[in-house]
Amino acid sequence: MGKPVAVLVGCVTFVAIAACTSTAPGTPASSSPPRPGDPIDLTEFAGTPCGLLNGAQLRTFFITQAGTAAPHGTGTECRWTPSDTTALAYHAMVEAGAGGLAAVYGRRATYPAFEPTSVHSYPAVHTDIGTGRCTVTVGVADDTVLTATVDVTDPKLTAYGDPCLEADRFAGAVIGYQGHRAP
């Protein structure tokens, strides 16, 4: 009687493992959440991120001067400083063709922080949270992410206490503007 039970347990285990496998053998499963909305094509801004927002959107952040683009990692980042302070800076960049948010999830152990969130219903992750600093990376398309960082050096500024709220707000402005832009 011991043998049929062992065979039955073995069969049940095999069926359970087979049923739980949803990807082809050798294909890693994506651990990032799905994108609920239409993709936003930001690929044109990978090399020119200072064009992500127009003047009206930038003015809502008290930015009246053009941003400054500079190489950052494997891409180009734009930095904007509001006209009313030098203690606050916004940075943004677009990475296209590097695996999207799934690649960010794959590198999760390499970030100082990893806090899943969402920005305008798009899946996102806070990957750099520190005193007066927050970086949010948003999956805007399968193979494209928007990364926004806020640096605040003055503890008297409201954004100093919750820089992630400000980083999410900035990334949300980009998503809202670019997501509704006429083709």
Image (cartoon, rainbow, N blue to C red):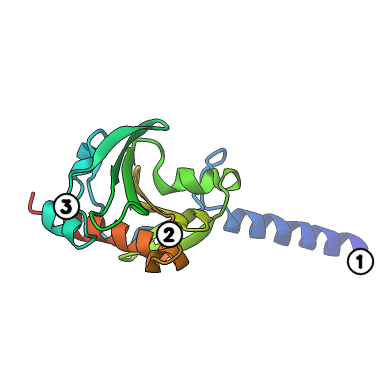
Whether pointer 2 and pointer 1 mark residues with C-beta atoms closer than 8 Å, the reply is: no
Using the rendered image of the protein, determine whether residue 29 is visible from the camera's viewpoint: no
The span from disc 2 to disc 1 (Cα, nearest Å) is 75 Å
> Which residue carries the number 1 mark?
1
The span from disc 1 to disc 3 (Cα, nearest Å) is 82 Å
Instruction: Tell me the SS state at disc 2.
Output: loop
Q: Residues within 10 Å of mark 2 (few under 14, many from 20)?
A: some
Instruction: Tell me the SS state at disc 1.
Output: loop
The one of 102 and 171 positioned closer to us in this rendering: 171
Sequence order check, earlier mark of 1 and 3: 1
Q: Is residue 32 above or below residue 165?
A: above
Q: Position of residue 56 (x, y in %)?
A: 12, 58
Instruction: Tell me the SS state at disc 3.
Output: loop
Q: Residues within 10 Å of mark 1 (few under 14, many from 20)?
A: few
> Which residue carries the number 2 mark?
154
Using the rendered image of the protein, determine whether residue 58 is visible from the camera's viewpoint: yes
Sequence order check, earlier mark of 2 and 3: 3
* Mark toward the viewer: 2 or 3: 2
Q: Position of residue 78 (x, y in %)?
A: 29, 41
Q: Which mark is residue 183?
A: none
Q: Residues within 10 Å of mark 3 (few under 14, many from 20)?
A: some
> Which residue carries the number 3 mark?
64
x 45%, y 56%: residue:
134
